[in-house]
Amino acid sequence: MAQDRTQAPAPLEAAVSAARRRLVPFLFLLYIVAYLDRVNVGFASLQMNRALGLSPRAYAWGAGIFFASYTLFELPSNLLLARLGARIWIARIMVTWGLVSAGMMFVRGAAGFAAMRFALGAAEAGFFPGIVYYLTRWFPERERARTIASFMTAVLGAGIVGGPISGACLSLDGVGGLAGWQWLFLLEGLPAAALGALVLRVLPDQPEEARWLSPAERGALAARLAQEAHAGREAHTSPAAALTSGRTWLLAAVYFTIPVALYAASFWLPQIIKRASGWSDVAVGGMSAIPYIFGAFGMVASAHHSDRTGERRWHVAGAALLGAAGFAATARAGSAAGALVALSVAMAGLASMFGPFWTLATAHLRGTGAAAGIALINSIGNVGGFVGPYLLGYAVDRTGRFSAGLLLVAATLAAGGALVLAVRQPPRGAPAASPPPAAGGRSNAWTEAAIRGDTR
């Protein structure tokens, strides 16, 4: 008898599809707000630096000091998330960072700017690695690169919508007695606090708590994740094992190079375009969306191809070299059009690294070891988030041009692409041949049946 082509998908596929529809768009929105609050100083600087008397180096120091406090508090924050649950801890992060971000409107000088950026980093610490850890508790490895990439396109989404929104905020200069950059911080900070309250209603901590999944779907997804949690002898399940793993530290070194480039671009892109073009602040805000649009396409395409082939390292390395070439070309661009094209290539390559990288990075981490390992990798990366913007600020202070700093960023990214090839890629996540009995005394046979959807 021919198979019925209209039959419902198996419970595992149905559960993954439902989780993607329910969780990823909301997490995408949260990360857009988070990333915009993190990098909107790049647009504020078009007015703020002159108003506060900030030199390029003072601005770069204040923009980058965010990452010092983020790094300092990230690991304990992620461990608390694993203990208390994502729903409660992510809500706490969002409310505090929203209030601090809005409070940036009261800054009056270089010292206050740096202090508030430090406070913002402490408030937001753990958000991104917490979300990555959260996704590992919902999506099997074979779905993870495209899922992480779908979530992380919010970085590009923030650039696409953030430029025009920030430009519009800057145009409010003088309204209500506030400068445009003050309106920018206020109007882009408060939504985070409001969304924090919504997190408590929307995010279940794990599949077993999802009322929008059927019992068969919950069982199938939980069983698959349980099997993968026990798959492979090299998986690190404790914080100590993850933090002392040479593979974790090597991946952290690779990841260091990505934020160097990402935040160098994010914090300085408006000024690079402004200097190359002489356009108005509103026009700069609109045109700055173009590189992020190319980055979004690159990120999604790379993640889909990486999941389809199961290959991770060369996807990261190739994307890194493309990004490095784009930054090097930006350094040599002689016109606004040339700078926009080069920055678009740079962002496409850079963004294409994220999905394959985080799938590679989480392949050997399980349980609280995943929370610790992800936090460590992201913490080291956030040091790069300070180094990249500061390199550009230092170069501008010394030479009056962006060229030398952009070439250093390009070299750093290329080095990360070479270094990732030293990471051994584990076999693609197949379930363990003989996983231990499930909780409650259920046998391996029941676990395998749950994945198939046959739990009669």
Image (cartoon, rainbow, N blue to C red):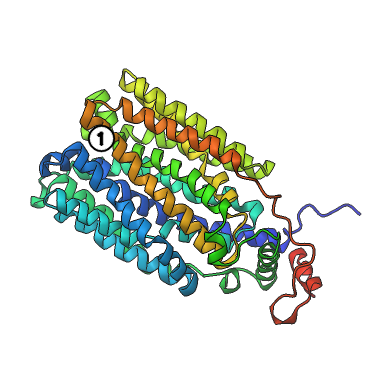
Quadrant in the rendering for residue 366: bottom right
Image height check: is 189 above or below 84? above
Question: Dot 1: within a 10 Å radius of its alpha carbon, few (fewer than 14), some, or many (20 or more) residues?
Answer: many
Quarter containing the N terminus? bottom right
Q: Give the residue type that dot 1 points to.
A: Tyr
- Residue 380 in view, yes or no: yes
Residue at 28% x, 30% y: name it: 272
Q: Tell me the residue that label 1 is attached to.
A: 394
1 on left or right of 19 = right
Instruction: List x then y, in percent, for residue 345.
Output: 45, 29
Name the residue at the left extreme. 177
Instruction: List x then y, in percent, for residue 57.
Output: 21, 39
Residue at 50% x, 29% y: name it: 322
Instruction: List x then y, in percent, for residue 45.
Output: 21, 41
Residue at 18% x, 41% y: name it: 171
Quarter containing the C terminus? bottom right
Quadrant in the rendering for residue 17: bottom right
Quadrant in the rendering for residue 196: bottom left
92 on left or right of 102 = right
Name the residue at the top extreme. 334
Image height check: is 69 above or below 158? below
Q: Nearer the viewer, residue 119 or 167?
A: 119
Instruction: List x then y, in percent, for residue 54.
Output: 15, 41
402 on left or right of 319 = left
Tally the marks: 1
Q: Secondary structure at mark 1?
A: helix
Q: Nearer the viewer, residue 254 or 353?
A: 254
